[in-house]
Image (cartoon, grey):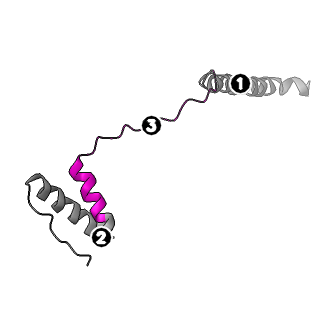
């Protein structure tokens, strides 16, 4: 008779374990269904290059020839492109 005394508690525990197992199984199936259906490799996305102006190309070549880098290069290219568009001589910016 003592065994029957604990039967409701055992039944409740068994139901709790069973329902948590069912929820875990259900959760796992949903996680798998969200996975892509086919694992095909697609071509990597390529950036479309903007068309560079002739002034930009010329100023970059001159900055390379002068060995300019960093802020000096940025300043030179900006001044160079402005001068070329205004049909003025290219400024002589020296590396600091």
Task: Name the residue that disc number 2 marks.
Answer: 66
The location of residue 61, given as percent across then percent down, is: 30, 59
x and y, in percent, of residue 77 in the image: 22, 60
Which numbered mark, 2 or 1, is in the foreground of this view?
Answer: 2
The image shows residue 91, relative to residue 22, as above or below, that is below
Q: Residue furthest bottom?
A: 96
Which residues, given as a range, are shown in magenta?
Answer: 38-63
Going from the N terminus, do you reach mark 3 or mark 1 first?
Answer: 1
Q: Residue at x 75, y 25 (%)?
A: 12
Q: Quadrant of residue 22?
A: top right
Q: Residue at x 24, y 52 (%)?
A: 56
Mark 1 residue crowding within 10 angstroms, few (<14) / some (14–19) / many (20+) = few
Residue appearing at x 90%, y 26% in the figure: 3
Disc 2 is placed on an element classified as helix
- State the residue at coordinates (44%, 37%): 46
| Rendering quarter of residue 33 | top right
Q: Which residue carries the number 1 mark?
A: 25
């Amino acid at each position: 008779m003592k065994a029957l005394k604990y039967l409701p508690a055992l039944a409740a525990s068994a139901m709790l374990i069973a329902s948590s197992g069912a929820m875990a199984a259900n959760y796992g199936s949903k996680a798998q269904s969200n996975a892509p259906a086919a694992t095909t490799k697609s071509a990597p996305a390529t950036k479309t290059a903007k068309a560079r102006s002739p002034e930009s190309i010329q100023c970059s070549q001159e900055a390379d020839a002068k060995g300019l880098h960093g802020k000096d290069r940025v300043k030179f290219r900006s001044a160079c492109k402005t001068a070329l568009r205004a049909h003025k001589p290219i400024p002589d910016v020296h590396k600091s």
